[in-house]
Image (spheres, rainbow, N blue to C red):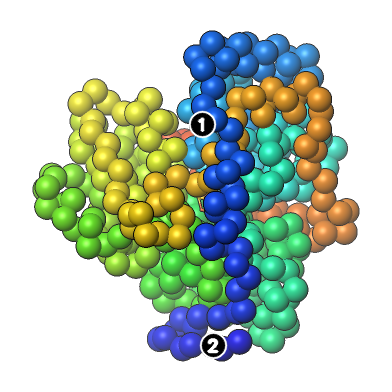
Amino acid sequence: MTTAVKDARRLYEFPKPDASGVCLTAQAWARVEPPATRAERTSAKQRIRELLRERNAVLVAHYYVDGDIQDLAEETGGCVADSLEMARFGRAHRASTLVVAGVRFMGETAKILNPEKTVLMPDLDATCSLDLGCPVDEFTTFCDANPDRTVVVYANTSASVKARADWMVTSSIALPIVEHLKARGEKILWAPDRHLGRYIQEETGADMLLWDGACIVHDEFRAAELGLLKAQHPGAKVLVHPESPRAVVVQADVVGSTSGLIQAVLDNPGGTFIVATDGGILHHMRKLAAPGTTLIEAPTAGSGATCKSCAHCPWMAMNSLRGVARVLEEGNNEIRVDDDIAARARISIERMLEFAAAHRIGGRPKAGGLSANPEAHGGLGPA
Ligand code: SF4
């Protein structure tokens, strides 16, 4: 293990497993079901509508999953959102079963906040390179070696890692929380995304010790190719998720969470945008965008990259309409979290939710600005 010092930011390097490498992403792509026919999709959607009613269930989907699943979630009274809003929505909703279309840490967070509810996921092996790259034993050693630091972890971590943290944050709330901690004079231990950690450190000037993890999708965006694309579209605004490398982030007109990037499209009707985040977001952007809006995917590394370099997450792609119908039919793929781990993880998650409520941060994108109105969460009251 080594620790590199750069300004007030320190990067912690750990002995990485091959978790975020070629092998696991190839395995994940191999698990993605072949595309369904139009007739199969229509039939699966109808069956899901019926099953959601019969099982008193609600569908909660992330912006990166299949467009049909996103549409179905909205149509049936569920939600499509970022991970902060997914957590808030699931907690506020009266359904006894939550079907979470996303990746495993999202299902675990839903279960931790809703221990009395059944939480199902289309595929329990749908994970995340950030989660895989932050094993709890090594993370605990890292924390124990730095007892003077407040431990802040990104949502993209296991329940066990959240249980070791003081705060959990999502990308839509990380900046104000770190600013808040800095104002209290606290030094921060951040995990696992190094790019997001660096971005927050540079924005806030906080003293941050960073875990060396990365998202295999955002890590693939390339600065030189982005520069060439910008030259071809001189009027385009560049929208970048802060899990991307610094050389990409510095070219952005807007740096933000998924909700923040969608909001930027709504705030500039008819504009042209180069979008550097998972391509799944384009489905929701196109639905909300004003006529004449042009959306262009930011360039990735090409065929030599460690993943398919298609700006799409293989684990998000493991969510299928067939999978959603299957778990509702069979009631399998239930998320379970050890009671002791859940109790400790809940503290770090609740801290973030209380901070969001107190500072009126969050909400889903809409014309006129991000909505913090509880009505935007299905009319079911505040989270
Ligand atoms: S897009 Fe990246 S951060 Fe999101 S689930 Fe996939 S690997 Fe994790």
Residue at the (61%, 11%) spot, across then down: 43
Q: Nearer the viewer, residue 59 or 366?
A: 59
Question: Image height check: is 195 above or below 62?
Answer: below
Element at label 1: loop
How packed is label 1: few (under 14 Cα within 10 Å), some, or many (20 or more)? many
Residue 37 position within the rendered picture, expressed as x and y whole percent measured from the top left? 51, 17
Instruction: Compare residues 38 and 162 and report the one nearer the observer.
Output: 38
The N terminus lies in which quarter of the figure? bottom right
CB-based contact (under 8 Å), mark 1 and mark 2:
no
Q: Residue at x 51, y 27 (%)?
A: 35
Q: Secondary structure at mark 2?
A: strand
| Quadrant of the rendering where the C terminus is positioned | top right
Residue 233 position by quadrant: top left
Q: What is the three-letter code of the residue carrying label 2?
A: Thr
Residue at numbered disc 1:
66
Q: Residues under labels 1 and 2: Cα distance?
A: 39 Å
Residue on which disc 2 sits:
3
Q: Residue furthest right?
A: 339
